[in-house]
């Protein structure tokens, strides 16, 4: 497998790219945490951006739903944002104050599901803006990322609770303990094998859980790599960011890990996405969007 890095400078400085997702329009969409914008980059590297109405909203995670709408979390503003193809941007305020919405995913029910870090809740919002919240057993679990599973439920990481959670569309919650103590799970994704994969930012491992709750863990070769986000690839693999070691990691479904050093020093990669063609895109807090071009 041949790999080549390309990096694109964000047009406006101090943007702080964080989350990134593949859009239904073929472009990549990303959050500019410091710049308070939603950015867009085409396969050819052309960029544009959209201002978020609320100042210092703290835009974090981002997705494109089946309708092509862009949804994102506003960590500081306590809101969920929605950007439509026509450029219309709406914001929806959460019922409770300082909930700190962070992770976001589309559910099988068509609603958009999200985590509330400070509130210890899982929320969902319909296309019309109706919000429902579900409390976790531990209010201090600090739910982080969330993903749709293979079983019609949503799965999420509990960064402080050291658990992987599962919530049905009806709101029924189940939790599973992670073997490594204080592992600090963050990024989570449904893998090509139908398992739930997650990163352990403190444990320095990649975890794998079957829908039945069986867990396996794989050590990352680089010590203190601080893995952050993870996403499925197109070749029976998953890709993840290592923000402390400045690398992009790849893990096969049988647990083999390969790491690739990012050319720019101290890039601080966070969000990650894989395009339909298999290229790995990632957000660099150093005001760049990175791309690892992958070919056989």
Image (tube, rainbow, N blue to C red):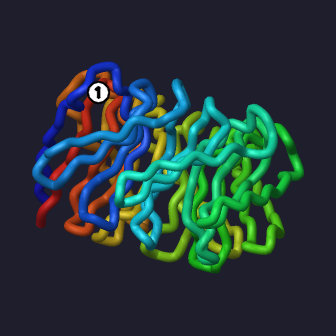
Query: Residue at position x 24%, y 42% from top?
Result: 48
Residue 185 is at least partly visible in this image: no
Residue 151 is at least partly visible in this image: yes
Q: Position of residue 237 (x, y in %)?
A: 35, 65
Query: Between 80 and 257, which is closer to the camera in this rendering?
Result: 80
Q: Secondary structure at mark 1?
A: loop
Query: Residue at position x 21%, y 46% from top?
Result: 291
Q: Is residue 231 left or right of residue 131?
A: left
* Image position of 168 with respect to 203: above or below: below
Q: Position of residue 96 (x, y in %)?
A: 81, 40
Q: Is residue 270 left or right of residue 135?
A: left
* Image position of 268 with respect to 20: above or below: above
Q: Position of residue 221 (x, y in %)?
A: 39, 40
Query: Between 140 and 163, which is closer to the camera in this rendering?
Result: 140
Q: Residue furthest bottom?
A: 151
Q: What residue does disc 1 label?
A: 287
Q: Quadrant of residue 196?
A: bottom right
Q: Which quadrant would the N terminus be assigned to in this image?
A: bottom left
Query: Between 54 and 176, which is closer to the camera in this rendering?
Result: 54
Q: Which quadrant would the C terminus be assigned to in this image?
A: bottom left
Query: Residue at position x 23%, y 34% from top?
Result: 262
């Amino acid at each position: 497998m041949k790999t080549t890095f390309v990096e694109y400078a964000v047009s406006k400085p101090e943007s702080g790219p964080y989350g990134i997702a593949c859009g239904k329009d073929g472009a990549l969409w990303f959050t500019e945490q410091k710049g308070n914008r939603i950015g867009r980059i085409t396969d050819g590297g052309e960029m544009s951006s959209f201002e978020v109405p609320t100042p210092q909203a703290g835009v974090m995670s981002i997705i494109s739903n089946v309708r092509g709408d862009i949804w994102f979390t506003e960590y500081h503003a306590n809101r969920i944002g929605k950007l439509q193809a026509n450029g219309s941007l709406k914001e929806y305020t959460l019922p409770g104050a300082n909930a700190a919405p962070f992770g976001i995913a589309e559910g099988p029910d068509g609603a958009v599901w999200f985590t509330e870090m400070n509130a210890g809740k899982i929320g969902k919002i319909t296309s019309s803006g109706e919000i429902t919240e579900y409390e976790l057993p531990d209010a201090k679990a600090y739910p982080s990322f969330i993903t749709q599973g293979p079983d019609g439920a949503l799965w999420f990481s509990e960064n402080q609770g050291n658990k992987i959670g599962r919530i049905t569309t009806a709101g029924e919650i189940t939790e599973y303990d992670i073997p490594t103590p204080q592992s600090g799970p963050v990024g989570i994704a449904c893998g090509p094998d139908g398992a739930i994969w997650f990163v352990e930012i403190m444990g320095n491992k990649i975890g794998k859980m079957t829908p039945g709750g069986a867990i396996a863990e794989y050590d990352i070769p680089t010590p203190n790599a601080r893995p952050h986000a993870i996403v499925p690839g197109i070749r029976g693999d998953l890709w993840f960011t290592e923000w402390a070691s400045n690398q992009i990691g790849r893990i096969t479904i049988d647990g083999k890990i390969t790491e690739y050093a990012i050319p720019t020093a101290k890039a601080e990669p966070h969000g990650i996405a894989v395009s339909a063609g298999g290229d790995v895109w990632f957000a660099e807090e150093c005001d760049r969007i990175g791309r690892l071009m992958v070919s056989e």
